Structure formats: C-alpha cells, structure tokens
Image: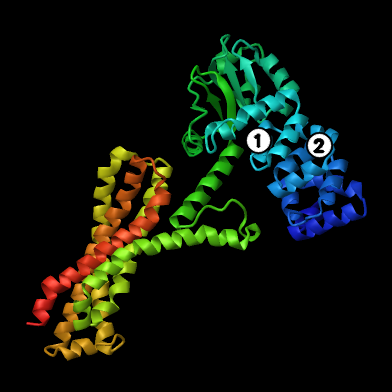
Amino acid sequence: MEEKEELSLEELGEEIVEAVKTRNAAKIKDIFETIPNIDIAEAIEDVDDVNVYIYIFRVVKSEYTAEFFAELDPEIQEKIINALTDKELVELTKNSFADDITDTLEEMPANVVSRVLKACPKDIRQDVNYLLNFKDNTAGSVMTTEYLEMKDTTTIKDAIKIIRDKGRDAETIYTIFVRDSTRTLVGTVDLDELIFADEDAKLEEIMNRDFVTCNADDDQEEVANMFKRYDLNAMAVVNKENKIIGIITIDDVVDIIVEEATEDIAHLAAVSTMDEPYLKTPTLKLVLKCVPWIIVLMILQVFSAMILSSFETAISQFAILAVFTPLIMDAGGNSGGQTTTMIVRSLSLEEFEGKDYGKVVWKELRVASVIGLIVSSFAFGWLMFEMSVGIINTDSINDIGGNFYGNVALVSLLVASTLFVTMLISRLVGCSLPFLAKLIKLDPAVVCGPITTTMVDIISLITYFLLWTQVLAPIIFK
C-alpha cells in the first residue's frame, strides 16, 4: 500500500499497462482496491490501446469500473462502449448512476447513445431519458435521481434498515429527504441526527423543516451559490408542487464551481471556453478560440485610432505627447480590469444585488480617488526625474525654448492629471458594466473585459489631448 502511494501517476500508468500485458489480473484488482479511480484514470489517460481498458473491465468488479468509467475522457469512453459486449455494457450501466450516464451520453454520437440506453436497466433508462431533457447548465441537467426518500411517519429504526438495504444504490446517505402522504417534500434528516435519535421516534419528530430547495430550471451557478450560502451537502430539486424530482450533491457542485470559474476566467481574458484539456485540444481549435476575439478587439480599437488621428497635428507639433500615450492607456485598462474582475466575482457569489449599485459606485469613487492621487503623484515625480536626467528624449521640449524645467513640470502635470481622471473613470466604468450586463441578462464575464478596456482607452485619450490642446498648449506656446 505504501509503495503505491509513493508512485507518480506516470509510474502507476506504466505499472497498469505492464500488468495488462502480462495478464496479471491479481495486480490490476489490487490497484483498483487500493488507489482512487480518478488517479487510475489520469495515470492511463494517454493510453490509446482500447484493449488495455477492456481487459481492466473484464477482470475488475463492476462496482469499481463503473466509477472508473465516469472519470475517463469522452473519446476513451466511446471506444470502450463500442468494444464491450452487450452483456458487459448491461453490467456497466447497472452499477452506474443515472447522472453519470447522462453526462457521458451528452458527448456521444446518436448510435452510441442508442446502444447504451438499450443496455440500461429499465429504471435507469427512464432516469437517463428524463435527465437528458433538461437544458444544459441547469439544476435539472446536473441532478441525480438516486436518492433516499422516506415518509414522515417512518420510525428511526425502519429508516436505518432502509439505508442498509438501499443506501448503496443512492448517491448519498448523509441526507435523507422526507415526504408526507401526498409525496410533498416536508423536511430533511442528516445521518448523524438519525443515528443519535430514539429508534422508536418518527422522522417527522427530528426532521429539519427549514430545508432549502431549487427548481429544475434554476441556473447551476445559482445552485452552487446556495450550497455555499447554506453550507449544504445535498439539496432537493423540486417541481412546482414541491415534489422532489431529484437531488444535487456537493460533488456535483464542486464540478459546477470549477466549470463556471474556468468559463469566467476565459471570458475575462477574451478567450472562448475550453471544452477539453489544453494539451489535448487540436492546434486549429485553439486558433479558432482566440482569433475571433482578437479581431473583435482590433475593430473596437478603431475608435482609439480615430482619436489619435484627430489630434495628429498636436502630436506632430509636440512629439513627446506620443511617448506617454501607451502609459495612459495601459494604466486605465489595468485599473478598469481590476475593478471589473472584483465586481464580476462578487456578482457571481451574490455578495450584492442590482439594488446595491449606488453603494458600489460610491465605494469605488472613494477607492478611485485615493488610487488616483497616489498614482498621479508618483507619475508626476517619476516623469520629472526621467525627463530631467534624459531617460526620456526631450528634444521636442528643448525646441520650444523657454524654461526647460518649467515645461517638463507642465508635461508631467498633464500626464499626472490625465492619470487621475483615468483612474476615476476606469473604475467607475469597470464597476458599472457588470451591473448593466446583469440587468440585460448577459454574462458579465463575457461582456465586460473587452468593453471596459476599449471604453477606458477612448476616454483616457480624449481627456489627455483635450487637457493638452485646451489648457497646457496655450500656456507653453504663449
């Protein structure tokens, strides 16, 4: 056992493949009894020979291989389904949960789906067909129909007996769902409460009546937030009559959180979401995920180019203006991006709602003012230093004559003032756009990243050149 725990995934994979080659069934069985299925699946994920998997399925108990199968990549799953006999497929589905089978079939072609459904026991087939009808990313699409439901008049003694008889086929035994005579959900009982209760008491005497439920059409991200808010291990999915139709467990929620976080990060970085691991994604597919966004952002940047073109004369008269343009645009984009990321995160975690917009704006205004003062003060001193010692070329300042250090101070003040305004505007835009996206029912992570950057760039450039042409240029060129 200790040796296996010290094995790397690569070494474990080699050990499994070698055991298959030598037909060492005892070794394979021992590995499955002592090592988690997810580790075994990852250890041999690069093995393309379907015969390795088929040998495993034929020598290892189905109670292990059913869970192992659920951890494999869709491509490997399809190969295994096509290679298994009908009898072996029946055995596999019989020991699998309906929600795991549903997740698998969503990735499969129609002929494979048909064969799997045909192999499923009748009750599981009905559950899978039921789950396949729900929209993606909803509570219904991730729920399972294998749960323990008991009448409120059931005694503790009988409840424990039911758990022993049927618990192995349920997704979880840690939460029992209690219904009344009309099959309406009326409470829940946690396993620890059940164990310590008087065996002659009834479930209705110890059940929790303040339970939380969700509807099948609820968004999966909202469900995940409910698990976090109420610290749940399992939650009932109910219909309009408050009758339970399935449950969602904490392991499903962990998958949802990872999926939603990955999606949000991709959107904030202006990249389409990844459906499979990076190293397994074809080069062309990666290109197609990135290129559309790059082109869209290039089109949006046309507005910035238009502004620069409008002030071309001012730039040609005083070339040093162009030197600080990237600094101003980058500072604004970075500041707006920070705010957008924080607000999108808070909205997704439901830390505040639309009605809190005023509070958020007021808070960001204070934060932006302090940041703007710090950044603009630092920028003023730093640019004075860079231009005074020659780090930045100051020929255009020398050409206009007059007091050199006075002109350097005015240019530094121009950039510092623009940065202060940019900090204010970028953070206000960055906190407002997610609220607007939420209001019009768009994903804030999709909309806000690119638009925030573009809007801040435009506003920053307009502020910069207007301050120059309307305020400082008349002073310097008087």
Find residue 157 and report its image quarter: top right
Q: Nearer the viewer, mark 2 or mark 1?
A: 1
* 394 or 405: nearer the viewer: 394
Q: Position of residue 9 (x, y in %)?
A: 74, 57
Q: Residue 62's mark?
A: 2
Q: Pointer 2: residues within 10 angstroms few (<14), some, or many (20+)?
A: many
Q: Identify the residue at the far front of this view.
A: 111
Q: Position of residue 105 (x, y in %)?
A: 67, 38
Instruction: Reply above or below: 287 against 213.
Output: below
Q: Amino acid at mark 1?
A: Thr
Who's the residue at 57% across and 34% down the image?
Answer: 141
Q: Identify the residue at the far left of this view.
A: 478
Who's the residue at 19% across and 86% down the image?
Answer: 397
In what element is the residue under mark 1? helix
Q: Amino acid at mark 2?
A: Ser
Q: Are marks 2 and 1 in contact (CB under 8 Å)?
A: no
Q: Which residue is mark 1?
A: 102
Task: Report the coloring of the rendering.
Answer: rainbow
Q: Using the numbered discs, state the Cα–Cα distance from disc 2 to disc 1 in whole angstroms.
A: 18 Å
Relative to 146, 303 lies left or right: left
